[in-house]
Image (spheres, rainbow, N blue to C red):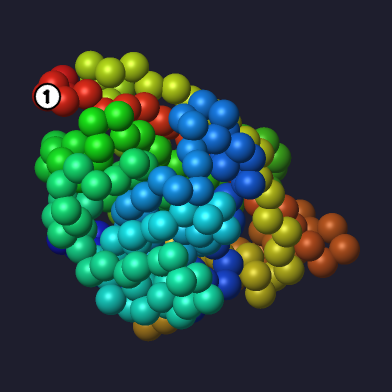
């Protein structure tokens, strides 16, 4: 995991907890049907953050080892997942999980793998997975062309989002083949929606690591722009963010990835 990525969300934890989207329950049905996921399987959830996806695994009855390098995010995740006795929180990275070799039946990473050092993480995943273990990479991908509101929101991010273009996860999803190669991988897609009033939409925007924060000269103009977009497209005080949830899954090959 790149060093700067482990600290990007430290000041955004509250908004992340409140306003980030969840994940469709259909993901679990997919993993059961296609990968044979059972409650007795041990799972390493890498960069589990505030535990949004982790909870689905725990509710399935799995023993989950959540690995998270960011102390503030991990603390929030630990509090969120405190009711689950089958959860263990670990200070580690995708490249150095600290987990014992050959012990995991599944490895999951939700909204995170674009931050990993691909080659180092891949080696670590192969090390901790059992020989027939599954690797599952998940992203909520915001639709940017499904409505005029979605297009305007994308333009706002492009204008004020700092390194948005260089860090957006689509850069990595285009390289999924390289991550799993030479093993084939499968793909699932599900729809997701979030309904927001203005306060919620602002919180969702500010949960993103690339948006300016209070004190930045761009902060005020960005929120002014956001308010204008909301007012133009809201219906009955509400706006909808639409996503496609992409799920990539395969058994990692022990052979080196292609370059």
Which residue: 33% across, 52% down?
A: 44
Place of residue 258 in the rendered image (x, y in percent of width and height, measured from the top left): 16, 20
Query: Regarding mark 1 in the picture, which secondary structure is present there?
Result: loop
In this view, the residue farthest toward the bottom is 215
Residue closest to the eye, 143 or 74 = 74
Which residue: 39% across, 58% down?
A: 64
Which residue: 70% across, 40% down?
A: 147
Q: Is residue 181 visible?
A: yes
Which residue: 12% across, 24% down?
A: 256
Place of residue 83 in the rendered image (x, y in percent of width and height, measured from the top left): 53, 76
Relative to residue 95, is residue 251 drawn left or right?
A: right
Residue 182 drawn above or below residue 85? above
Place of residue 26 in the rendered image (x, y in percent of width and height, measured from the top left): 63, 40
Place of residue 15 in the rendered image (x, y in percent of width and height, measured from the top left): 51, 73
Q: Which residue is mark 1?
A: 256
Label 1, residues with CA under 10 Å away: few <14, some 14-19, many ≥20? some
Residue 142 drawn above or below residue 216? above
Residue 114 drawn above or below residue 82? above
Relative to residue 33, is residue 233 drawn left or right?
A: right
Corner quadrant of residue 227: bottom right
Residue closest to the eye, 165 or 130 = 130
Quadrant in which the C terminus is drawn = top left
């Amino acid at each position: 995991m790149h060093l700067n990525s482990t600290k990007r969300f430290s000041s955004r934890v509250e908004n992340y907890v409140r306003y980030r989207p969840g994940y469709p329950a259909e993901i679990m049905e997919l993993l059961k049907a296609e990968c044979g996921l059972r409650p007795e399987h041990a799972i390493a959830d890498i960069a589990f953050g505030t535990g949004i996806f982790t909870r689905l695994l725990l509710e399935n009855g799995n023993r989950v080892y959540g690995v998270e390098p960011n102390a503030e995010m991990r603390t929030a995740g630990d509090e969120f997942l405190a009711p689950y006795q089958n959860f263990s929180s670990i200070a580690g990275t995708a490249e150095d999980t600290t987990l014992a070799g050959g012990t995991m039946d599944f490895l999951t990473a939700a909204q995170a793998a674009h931050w990993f050092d691909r080659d180092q993480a891949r080696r670590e995943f192969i090390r901790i997975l059992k020989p027939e273990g599954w690797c599952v990479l998940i992203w909520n991908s915001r639709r940017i062309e499904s409505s005029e509101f979605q297009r305007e929101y994308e333009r706002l991010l492009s204008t004020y989002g700092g390194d948005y273009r260089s860090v957006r996860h689509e850069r990595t999803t285009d390289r999924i083949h390289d991550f799993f190669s030479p093993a084939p991988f499968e793909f699932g897609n599900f729809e997701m929606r979030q309904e927001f009033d203005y306060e919620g939409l602002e919180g969702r925007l500010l949960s993103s690591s690339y948006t300016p924060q209070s004190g930045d000269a761009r902060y005020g103009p960005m929120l002014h722009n956001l308010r204008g977009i909301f007012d133009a497209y809201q219906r009955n005080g509400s706006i909808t963010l639409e996503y496609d949830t992409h799920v990539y899954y395969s058994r990692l090959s022990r052979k080196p990835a292609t370059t």
